[in-house]
Image (tube, rainbow, N blue to C red):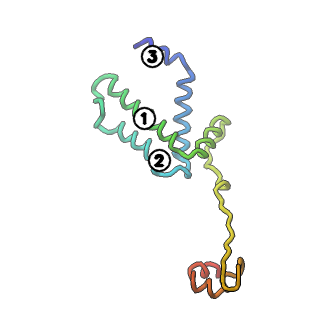
Amino acid sequence: MAIRISSWLSRPWSLRSLLLQARLAFRLLREPRVPMVMKAVPLLALLYVISPVDFVPDFIPGLGQLDDLGIVLAALELFVRLCPGSAHTYHREAITQRRRYSPMTPTDDVIDAELNLVTNGGITTDCVDKDSMFSNSFPFLAAANN
């Protein structure tokens, strides 16, 4: 067992990747574009760690702490995999470029649309508030244009 632990510790890339994963998860927790349901995964893992109910009781030396560590690592991995790909990519690149935290810019989610209405007189795209047929059919939309 000691050989296995020392060989794991001799690989700095595994510890570095673990720290990178934790840093990415922390950034994704702060990202507004990640749904709240997904943000509950690491919080539930933290609740499990502080909870007195465990799979393996904490009074068993070593094993009790290892199951807590396993749950936390699995929750972090699950959280990062469930996050939207665009947020994951954005924050991973920000970490590699050593940028400070900033939320994603909202420019990539804009939907530009034009409203075309078919009325008795043909297609209309302007003066919707003056169109009586539209105003009678959709008064809440016509009121917004006034």
| Sequence order check, earlier mark of 2 and 3 | 3
Quarter of the rendering containing residue 106: bottom right
Q: Is residue 27 left or right of residue 128?
A: left
Q: Which residue is mark 1?
A: 72
Check disc 2 and give the amino acid type. Met
The percent coordinates of residue 72 (x first, y second) are: 42, 35
Q: Which residue is mark 3?
A: 5
Disc 3 on helix, strand or loop? helix
Disc 1 on helix, strand or loop? helix
| Sequence order check, earlier mark of 1 and 3 | 3
* Separation of residues labelled 1 and 3 (CA atoms): 19 Å
In the picture shown, does residue 34 fall above or below 119?
Answer: above
Is 98 or 90 nearer to us in this picture?
90
Q: Is residue 93 left or right of residue 16?
A: right
What is the crowding at mark 1: few (fewer than 14 residues within 10 Å), some, or many (at least 20)? many
Q: Quadrant of the N terminus?
A: top left
Q: Which residue is mark 2?
A: 38
The percent coordinates of residue 117 (x first, y second) are: 66, 77
Q: Which mark is residue 29?
A: none
Is 96 or 98 nearer to us in this picture?
96
Check disc 1 and give the amino acid type. Val
